[in-house]
Image (cartoon, rainbow, N blue to C red):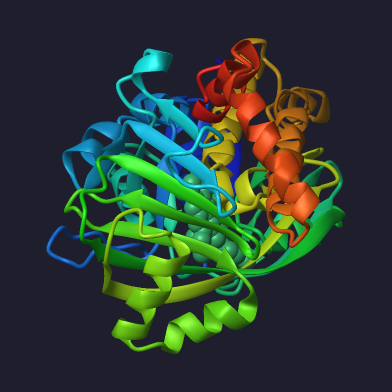
Amino acid sequence: MKRSYDVVIVGAGMVGLTAAALLSGNDQLRITVIDSGKRPVFDTDDEVSLRVSAIAPGSVEVLSKTGAWTEIVRNRVCPYRDMKVWDAAGNVDGPETLSFSAAEFAVGQLGFIVENTLIRHALLHQLEESDVRIRFETPIKTVTRAGHRFEIELEVGDRLNPDLLIGADGANSFIRGSANIGIRSWLHSQKAFVTCLKPEKSHCNTAWQRFLRTGPIGLLPLSDGRVSIVWSTTPEQAEEALSMSDAELSATLADVTDGVLGKLVPAGPRGAFPLKSQHAAEYVQAGLALLGDAAHTVHPLAGQGVNLGIADAEALAKVISTALQADENPGDLPVLRNYERARKGANKTMLHFMDGLNKLFSTESESLARLRGVGMYAFNKSGPIRDHAVQVALGIR
Ligand SMILES: Cc1cc2nc3c(=O)[nH]c(=O)nc-3n(C[C@H](O)[C@H](O)[C@H](O)COP(=O)(O)OP(=O)(O)OC[C@H]3O[C@@H](n4cnc5c(N)ncnc54)[C@H](O)[C@@H]3O)c2cc1C
């Protein structure tokens, strides 16, 4: 008879739940998911939530494997088929503007804009059909190393001794800290201001992004014709935008988006999030694996964060499945190193690329602005280099 193994996933965010759903089909695993927060609620009668994500085709494939995508796509999602990226020094119809369309990459769409709570809700729905135990509002007291494994003590008193502990508890990961895993962190001098707007012109199922000296502003299409904006700007400007009147906000945003969608009427709650990039020194130890934002946090400018996390979850699930077939313990370090090897290099490349882009564009330098224009024009004409970069971002390469 085959041995069973206990797996504890800390963090029922989009990444932790994707990992749980992918692993749930394996009857050798007894899985528990723990989250200190409340169970997310999604209801189509409720207002669109503040946090949405651009979900790339590669992630759609993974979410389809879990069964959750069928439910997600039936709800409030908006496909986008085109993307336009331009610099404040130029204009959206200029030759330097980067334009991508789904048709040229032989995909139905470049991605979907989806509410984060909908993704979590659909994954939880799938998990209801499995033996996975999910405990919300369950704070952890301590996580300590016990030989080759970790012991978790919950505030309610229970102690868990899993063969494998998966830390998917976000950017400020308690699990990462408890395992003494170092982290390289860069705090950006930017905050992301987020809200929903009703544009005067159609969003044309296009994701728009304009680079300003203070940071990029993205306009993401929503299924009801509104757009969700993510404006990475100075912390002062983001705070100011939080308290502006609707008329002031409308005028400011029409200006910073260069009127690409005409007048923008504020139509939703507002929020501001501090931005940082960070990368864990190691993703694994004996008995432990880090996934998603617990392992890496990237600038949101190209909407890659959760897509990288979903790819982590898929890679870890594959490594565990292979280990079980070979009668190996999924918590053993040599097994987990295969996961680290599969993901760390790719995540590092994306992290530095996003960071570099943000720095290159967020500068007052006139000479750099000219160089950028030349660079964007050259990238547009670069054929295979451009195609490769876009395919990686779409998660189809
Ligand atoms: C403004 C903005 C826009 C973004 N847009 C995009 C986008 O368009 N596309 C994209 O791919 N990415 C985007 N991202 C990034 C994306 O939101 C993150 O990468 C993603 O949410 C990470 O998911 P996660 O599950 O790893 O972590 P989280 O979403 O942070 O989830 C962590 C979970 O762990 C739980 N938790 C935390 N601590 C504990 C603890 N001690 N004990 C138990 N549970 C705990 C939390 O309650 C939470 O449920 C954006 C980010 C920002 C800031």
Quadrant holding the N terminus: top right
- The residue drawn where x is 66% and y is 25% is 378
State which quadrant residue 68 falls in. Answer: top left
Quadrant holding the C terminus: top right
Looking at this rendering, what residue extends furthest in the left direction? 45
State which quadrant residue 136 falls in. Answer: bottom left
Q: Position of residue 197 (x, y in %)?
A: 28, 66
Left or right: 135 in relation to 370: left
| Residue placed most toward the observer, 319 or 377 | 377
Left or right: 327 in relation to 69: right
Left or right: 16 in relation to 372: left
Left or right: 345 in relation to 214: right
Q: Position of residue 116 (x, y in %)?
A: 38, 53
Residue 298, can we see it? yes
- The residue drawn where x is 48% and y is 38% is 94
| Residue placed most toward the observer, 160 or 378 | 378
Residue 34, can we see it? no
Q: Position of residue 49 (x, y in %)?
A: 31, 64
- The residue drawn where x is 19% and y is 53% is 225
Q: Is residue 63 above or below residue 219?
A: above
Q: Is residue 217 above or below residue 58?
A: below
State which quadrant residue 337 falls in. Answer: top right
How many numbered tags mark residues here?
A: 0
Q: Position of residue 181 (x, y in %)?
A: 85, 53
Q: Is residue 289 above or below residue 334?
A: below
